[in-house]
Image (cartoon, coloured by chain):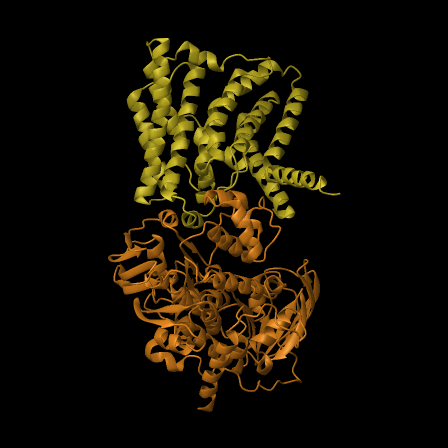
Amino acid sequence: MTSPSTEYLLEATEVSKRYGAVVALESASLRVRPGEAHALMGANGAGKSTLVKVLTGAVRPEEGTITVRGKARTVHSPAEARRGGLVSVYQEPALIPDLDISSNLRLTQTPIDPFRDWMAKLGIEGLDLAEMARNLPLATLRIIDLARALAIEPDVLMLDEMTAALPANLTERVLQVVKDRRGGEDSIIFISHRMTEIASVCDRATVLREGETVGVVDVTADSADQIVELMLGEVAADVLEGTARTAPTSQELDEPPRLEVRGLGSSARLRDVTFDLRAGEVLGLVALEGQGQDELFDILAGSERPSAGKVLVDGQEVSFRHPADAIRAGVVFVAADRADALLMQRSVRENIALPFSVRMSRWGRIQTKQEKPKIDKAIETLQIETRAQKEVRLLSGGNQQKVTIARWVAGGVQTMLCFDPTRGIDIRTKAQIYPLLRDLAEAGAAVLFYTSELSEIQLACDRAIVIFGGEVVAEIDARDADEATLLRAAHNLRSDAPLPEQVVGSADVEEAKADHSGEANDL
Amino acid sequence: MSTPQAPIARQMGALAAALRRNAWTLGLFGILGVLLVFTKIIQPTYGVTGIQGLAISVLPLTLAAVAQACAVIARGIDLSVGSMMALTSVVAASGMDGRSEGAAIVVVIGVLLLGCVLGAINGSLIVLTRVPDIVVTLAMLFVWAGCALLVLKTPGGGAADWLRDLTKGSVLSDWTPKAAVLLLAVVGVIWIPIRRSRLGLSLYAIGSDPLAAYRSGVSVTRTKIFAYMLAGLFSALGGLSLTASTGIGAPVPGPYLLLSVAAVVLGGVSLAGGRGGILGPMVAVVILSLIRTDMTFLNVDTNLATVTQGLILVGVVMIGSLIQLRRGT
């Protein structure tokens, strides 16, 4: 007889879903035991989000069955899924911006007291429930969304990229809550691109590739390689290869830096930031959420004006009044949110051509002939999947991000500001973006690279600066910038101080990763 | 100890927050006050009769503005508001024509139901066909206008006496015209319970962020149909008010559509949905109407008055937005 612990709480079997000719899911299966944290993994476009949509009732599958506690279920809407004990927390919070928090709770019929308890456990206290959702920072909204889901005690809680772009301290709290829930009655489905998180909180992982379930793995400290292999199939060997930095490129000290930032300040968040960005380097920038990095990038990209300090480009003081000024000075911006940067309903080509066709011939007709080779080259360099040539919105998130980079590559990059460009992107695309940034730097460009994922610093950068409380508090050579060091610096702690609530198990995976990249370097 | 002070401080904070949230509407009341004083100055005889006339004249447009606000809050727009008013008005007038006072009650209830049905048809078409709101309601503008002409070719019909009396005169004191009291009562009875219910929250939710609303378990389609049903109901009330004040039904709609949109915008309802209320547009209608009256008192050319009205609309919305922007709300 099967004991209760081996019975599945949620079981999705042979689920398939097609969108026209595109197969999103082809016999995907997912079995979740009670009391486990189950990772759902897969590269972008592997069908993860479609499977989530099927489970929450947002999409109806053509084939397949879903059973909850052994009973077949057809779910038609998120509301129905909710009533059935299946609740999702998405990457973009499902809070209504124009309602205050208490109205938002009322909308989902969430009891207030458990909500408050969870908020406290997740590290946010004294939240004013009369505050409009639109006035709260994104990280807080995510936590509210999670607390709201936890407050109704769901049987299955689905966390879709919950920790993406959460500051490190909140991420730890979230992971702790996930860990604490293991072993009980209820289960968690955990979707994340971050291998360290999976390793630290999940019991098992289901891996999807091209719409199919290709493996279920018992997660241990060193199952990261196995998962990556499953996710990527035959190309696994190339991934994470050669991305770790060797020695930083020599800096031409006689030339002025490409970008000099001197005592930059604006509002309360950004107080006094000074650093140099040299041609030929990728400079990493690390900060907890809300330390002034958003304001810094807005100023450098020309969207906002500083209240103090100055910015020099190639030794010349500049004052950008508009992003067009920044672009003219060769300072271009890659945002985390692709939707902010792309014309979603236009073609890949048009999107790439937009910034520099505007520049090349300000008046008169657009010279498509001159454009074409440049665009072709950019598409090729970035290996953009162009089957969906027609509209950018049909591309996967990773490919969209590549388009936002390609538009600047096509124009010839001098200085590129990347704000968390790999947020919510699959590991394969990430692994293409790091060497691309390196190549740009080697070709003479200067790249400023803010990331919320600390492990990326060593994969892509020459050195890193850390901002805390609106000031640069540390500069670290990439060779020394392991996650622990960066995390300490980001909390403005001395390098020998103990880590705040360190994530257990992450160190092991780091080691695994280091081994992997070490091999690549030997070749 | 400081414990007894804490709740007071919180209440003050809540009060301040409520004031901030309704700043736009409060500002409109301010403008209205200034306008009333201004009117009294340029026309010293303006008094009880003026107020009563004003209350009766703004009644149909106020209801149209409320109808429009219901659609706009849910991120829609209802271009058929004027046509629905005309259709319900002629149905009411021809239904009551030559019937007893008692039968008129049935007709009134029937017309209100008709309004709900018209609105529900609008909403269902939008939801089912997925054609944009503006296109569907534009088409329905013609459909309902045509239906109105099928019911009555020329202005005619009748109205029950009790219905006509509802808007005439005043209650309690001379300064509280019946029309205004009736308006506030009817709108309040319908809107306040809705606003406090989960349905009302859903209305704002789908206007503010449809995807987040869907993920929060709100049925976006049902809520949208409900929003248009409400718009239909308030349009029917507007149509009834037309019949009540004129005693007949007119098949060709008045200029209510564009004015209702103007009032909604001036009333602080965001055309992008999810923001604003019902009171703002109602006050905005009174302001727009009073400006017109003042122009007449000042002997301004009517065409120039229209131009001025438009400029004031743009000006107020622009200044209001600037103030909100500066305060960072």
What residue is shown at x 72% (from left), y 40% (from top)?
A: B5
Total numbered badges shown on the rendered structure: 0
Question: Which residue appears farthest toward the left when viewing the image?
Answer: A63
What residue is shown at x 58% (from left), y 18% (from top)?
A: B51
Residue A27 horizontal side relative to residue B81, left or right: left
Within the image, what quadrant is residue A230 found in? bottom left
The x and y percentages for residue B42 are 66, 21
The x and y percentages for residue A347 are 38, 63
Residue A387 in sight: yes
User: B237 and A143: which one is in front?
Assistant: A143
What residue is shown at x 33% (from left), y 58% (from top)?
A: A10
Within the image, what quadrant is residue B132 found in? top left
The x and y percentages for residue A255 are 65, 82
User: A457 and A87: which one is in front?
Assistant: A87
Residue A137 in sight: no
Q: Is residue A351 above or below residue A512?
A: above
Within the image, what quadrant is residue A291 found in? bottom right
Question: Which residue appears farthest toward the right when viewing the image?
Answer: B1
The x and y percentages for residue B36 are 63, 24
Q: Is residue A442 above or below residue A408?
A: below
What residue is shown at x 56% (from left), y 64% (from top)?
A: A167
Question: Which residue appears farthest toward the bottom when viewing the image?
Answer: A523
User: A485 and A336: which one is in front?
Assistant: A485
Q: Is residue A163 above or below residue B320?
A: below
Quadrant (top left/top right/bottom left/bottom right) for the N terminus of chain B: top right
User: B26 and A454: which one is in front?
Assistant: A454
The chain displayed orange equals A
The chain displayed yellow equals B
